[in-house]
C-alpha cells in the first residue's frame, strides 16, 4: 500500500503537469481557410468567437479558439460548429467538434462543394468585431 507522503507527491506532480498544460491562450478570433471546389478559389477569413460567418452554403461558428504560448510547441485548436444551408433553405448541422491547425486534415469540414479548416487563432483581426447590441 502506498504511503500518504508518496500519494501526496504523486498528486502534486499530476497537478503541476496539469497546470503546465493549462496555460493555453484563449483567443478572440479564429482564422479559417476555405476552398470552393467548383471554382478552385481558396480564401482565408476571420471569425470572432460565437459569431457566424457564411462561406458559400456553409455557416461557420467558432465557440473557443486556443493556442499555446510562443515559448511552447505550437498547438492551436478550436471548437467549431458548421451548418449547411440546403437547397430547400433549411439549416442542417454537418460538423460539431474540434479542429486542429497543426493537423488540418484531421477534422476539416469536407463538403461536396466546400472545404473549411482552421489556420490559426488570433487575439484580434482587421475585420471589425460584430456589434455587441
Image (spheres, grey):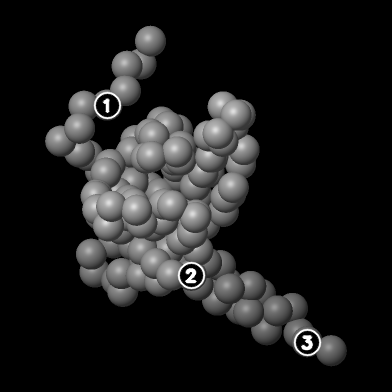
| Residue 8 in picture, x, y percent from top left | 66, 75
Q: Viewer-nearest of labels 3 and 1?
A: 1
- Report which residue position mark 3 lands on: 2
How much space separates mark 3 and mark 2, taking CA atoms? 41 Å
| Residue 2 in picture, x, y percent from top left | 78, 87
| Residue 23 in picture, x, y percent from top left | 39, 59
In this view, the residue farthest toward the right is: 1
In this view, the residue farthest toward the top is: 133
Residue 76 in which image quadrant: bottom left
The disc at residue 106 is 2
Seen in the picture, residue 130 relative to 20 is either above or below; the reply is: above
In this view, the residue farthest toward the bottom is: 1
Seen in the picture, residue 106 relative to 36 is either above or below; the reply is: below
> Element type at marker 3?
loop
Q: Residue at x 20, y 32 (%)?
A: 127
Residue 123 in which image quadrant: top left
Seen in the picture, residue 8 relative to 96 is either above or below; the reply is: below
How much space separates mark 3 and mark 1, taking CA atoms? 55 Å
The disc at residue 20 is none
> Element type at marker 2?
loop
| Residue 112 in picture, x, y percent from top left | 49, 55
Q: Viewer-nearest of labels 1 and 2?
A: 2
Amino acid at each position: 500500500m502506498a504511503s500518504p507522503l508518496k500519494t501526496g507527491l504523486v498528486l502534486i506532480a499530476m497537478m503541476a503537469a496539469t497546470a503546465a498544460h493549462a496555460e493555453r491562450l484563449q483567443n478572440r478570433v479564429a482564422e479559417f481557410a476555405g476552398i470552393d471546389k467548383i471554382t478552385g478559389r481558396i480564401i482565408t477569413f476571420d471569425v470572432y468567437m460565437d459569431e457566424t460567418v457564411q462561406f458559400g452554403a456553409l455557416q461557420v461558428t467558432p465557440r473557443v479558439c486556443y493556442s499555446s504560448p510562443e515559448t511552447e510547441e505550437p498547438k492551436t485548436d478550436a471548437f467549431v460548429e458548421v451548418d449547411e444551408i440546403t437547397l430547400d433553405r433549411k439549416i442542417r448541422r454537418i460538423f460539431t467538434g474540434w479542429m486542429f491547425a497543426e493537423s488540418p486534415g484531421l477534422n476539416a469540414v469536407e463538403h461536396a462543394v466546400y472545404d473549411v479548416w482552421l489556420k490559426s487563432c488570433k487575439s484580434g483581426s482587421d475585420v471589425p468585431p460584430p456589434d455587441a447590441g
